[in-house]
Every structure is written in structure tokens, then in C-alpha cells.
Amino acid sequence: MTGSALMDFLIGIIVLCAVVYLLFLALPRISPDETFTQIAKVVIGVLALVAILMAAKAVLFGGGGALAFSLGSLVTFAIGLIVVLIVIFLLYMAIDFVAPQFATPAKYVIGGIALIALLYLAAQSLTGGNPLPAKFRLGGAITPTVSASATTHLL
């Protein structure tokens, strides 16, 4: 165990606590249902526990499985959380103005979708990057390739 690894562990714990606290702070405002809130709390709690165990493993048993916590992930999560709250506020105002008779079901669906986006953002922040496997990463252009045998058939 090195001093650098121990400091990385402590920084990771602080970032982890901040992300979990921010999520728990925003959940009552975003989640449309108590069941959704409980599901989100369990998922974030388990994710945080696994992240702590993986960080401890990296410090105590040397490398392998360390998560890349950073201040950037905390700022990214906070920005995403603020954006989600603003969008929900604006959508709720629009729904109340345009179709008050459909406000309850529409707010339920919008709240559920916002909660999914927030959980994805929290997972991305807590795991130090994109939680999807490398071959399923979002972004980037898909470029077609033409093999040599395909071009000879065209001639």
C-alpha cells in the first residue's frame, strides 16, 4: 500500500459520498412515486458499496479493479442533476398550462424517465466513466468498410 493509493482511496470516498448525498437530496423532487424512490435508493446504495469495496481492494491488495473517481465526475453529476431539475420544472409548468387534465399521468411518466437518466448519470459518475462495455459505448461515427473481394465483384 502506497501513500498515493491511500490518498486516491480517500478522494474517491469523498466524491462517492458527495454523489450519493446529491442524489438522495434530489430524489424526492424527481421521483414520481415512493416505489421509484426506494428502487433508486437501493441501486445507488449497492453501487456505492461496490465502489467502496473495489477502491479498498485496489488499495489493500494492489491495483486491479480501481475505479477512477475524480472531481470532474462530481461536477458532471452536479451539472446533470441541475439540468434534470430545470427540465422537469419547465415540463411540469408546460403540462399544467396546456393539459391540466393529464397532468398526473404525464408527470408520472416524465418523473420516471428523469429518474432513469439520473441513475445512469450517477452510475457513470460513481464508476469513473461509461458503465457500458467498450463495444457498446455511445458516440463516435460508424464508418462502413469495403473489403477487397467486394470491389472485385463490382467490376
Image: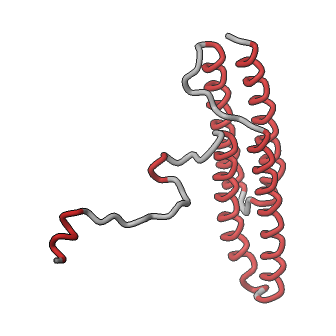
**Given the current orientation, which residue lies at the most extreme top position?**
1
Q: Nearer the viewer, residue 2 or 44?
A: 2
Measured along the vertical axis of the image, is residue 65 above or below residue 75? above
Q: Nearer the viewer, residue 46 or 38?
A: 46
Measured along the vertical axis of the image, is residue 114 above or below residue 137? below
144 sits left or right of 89 in the view: left
Q: Position of residue 27 (x, y in %)?
A: 78, 53
67 sits left or right of 139 in the view: right
Query: Which residue lies at the image location 78% right of the left edge and 36% below the top edge?
Result: 15
Q: Nearer the viewer, residue 39 or 71?
A: 71
Quadrant of the rendering where the N terminus is positioned: top right
Image quadrant in which you'd find residue 129: top right
43 sits left or right of 78 in the view: left
Q: Position of residue 60 (x, y in %)?
A: 64, 13
Image quadrant in which you'd find residue 93: bottom right
Query: Which residue lies at the image location 75% right of the left edge and 13% below the top edge?
Result: 3
Quadrant of the rendering where the C terminus is positioned: bottom left
Query: Which residue lies at the image location 50% right of the left edge and 64% below the top edge?
Result: 141
Q: Position of residue 48 (x, y in %)?
A: 68, 35
Q: What scheme was used to colour the molecule?
A: secondary structure
Image quadrant in which you'd find residue 14: top right
Q: Nearer the viewer, residue 140 or 86?
A: 140
Measured along the vertical axis of the image, is residue 96 above or below residue 88? below
Measured along the vertical axis of the image, is residue 75 above or below residue 113? above
